[in-house]
Image (spheres, helix red, strand yellow):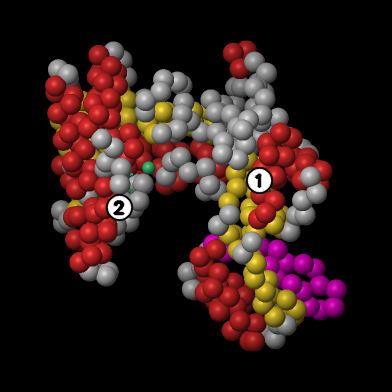
Amino acid sequence: MSLIVQKFGGTSVGSVERIEQVAEKVAKFRRQGHDVVVVVSAMSGETNRLIELAHQVQERPVPREMDVLISTGEQVTTALLSMALDKRGVKARSYTGGQVRILTDDAHTKARIREIDDQRLHASLAEGYVLVVAGFQGVDEHGNITTLGRGGSDTTAVALAAALKADECQIYTDVDGVYTTDPRVVDGARRLDRITFEEMLEMASMGSKVLQIRAVEFAGKYQVPLRVLHSFQDGPGTLITLEDTQQMETPTIAGIAFNRDEAKLTVEGVPDMPGIAYHILGPIGDANIEVDVIVQNISHDKTTDFTFTVGRNDLPRAREVLQQVAQEINAREVTADSRIAKVSVVGVGMRSHAGVASQMFQALAEVGINIQMITTSEIKISVIIEEKFLELAVRALHSSFGLDREPMDESAA
Ligand code: ASP
Ligand code: MG
């Protein structure tokens, strides 16, 4: 017997029929003798509907009241699911975030969890109840309702699993796991049986949007085994966990991630001297613009080019800031290009395998793709390329790193 936290997202509880199906699933686990804590999202579309209502009343809604409003969606689901469980003879109780006492800071609409009172939950579990907890919400120290940011129910689930020392946190959603890359881009994309927290963070931050990034960070920090599963199809899903150092042969690459949301800025003809990078990126940081890939060339005539990428939405503002900076430092000009994409190969196996970068560059060369920028970390190599070549690049890399095929023999490992 184990303690499992199960989280069901908006589409999984999008109608009464689906809530009944979820209840069936939860009841099955319960009958197997497991302790179950269920975390639910609002029914699909509900949070958006509530946000729209708010904007009809006030252009910039008061954050405190916004939280009172948008936290209601989850509460509806907890009650309906508890009823559906009760109907099946399963003892169940619904809880709001405040009732559990999921204590957060007071940053309305983007609060962070500080502490969870696990006493009441343990007591209720000991009485044989399935606990149905509203995701996405908490209370601050004055009892004001707070919410955790869009997609925050994932974080609620992981935080509860950590607080209760659950054996597993299962995230039920509309895909059956984490894939080697986006199956819409590569037909041969394959569901991964397991992936490490680190790899998942690199994959998630670049477009494989199965889980809220914050939830993965949280799970990694507290070492909560996390499993992504399909709500209505049976299957093992993908386990997100610590690196298995016992495993004989770790695949070098777990997957190919990509991102079309960046734009590139270049300050051309920058005098090459100490303090220049700071002079350029300081004002960008002050404007709250996040910088991703940075490249500065070696100068041959005492001037150089300084190139970096920002989120596409930030491009107009970044450009404005740079124009000012360029004048101050006597740079020649500022150019921008939003038709770029970032493609990354991700894998902890890279640490112990040489030649991953050259294999990546070879695969891109073979299909005639020009690399504009390169950046590496311990478990990731990313390149910036022209956006129109993105899908070609992802396919080439997916097959070059052997991700299309089934692994040799997993049972032997
Ligand atoms: N209902 C919230 C949202 O749509 C939280 C969640 O579903 O995770 O963002
Ligand atoms: Mg979600």
Percent x, y for residue 396? Answer: 72, 40
SS for tag 2? helix
Q: Which residue is mark 1?
A: 391
First-in-chain label (2 vs 1): 2
Q: Which residue is mark 2?
A: 48
**Image quarter of the C terminus:** top right
Q: Amino acid at mark 1?
A: Glu
- Ligand 1 is within 8 Å of the C-beta of the residue at disc 2: yes
Q: Amino acid at mark 2?
A: Asn
What residue is rendered at 55% in x and 28% in y?
192
Percent x, y for residue 272? Answer: 75, 77
Helix, strand or loop for the magenta stretch, by majority: strand
Magenta-drawn segment: 294-311
User: Which of these two is toward me, 103 or 344?
Assistant: 344
**Image quarter of the N terminus:** top left
Residue 358 in sight here: no
Q: Is residue 383 above or below residue 39?
A: below
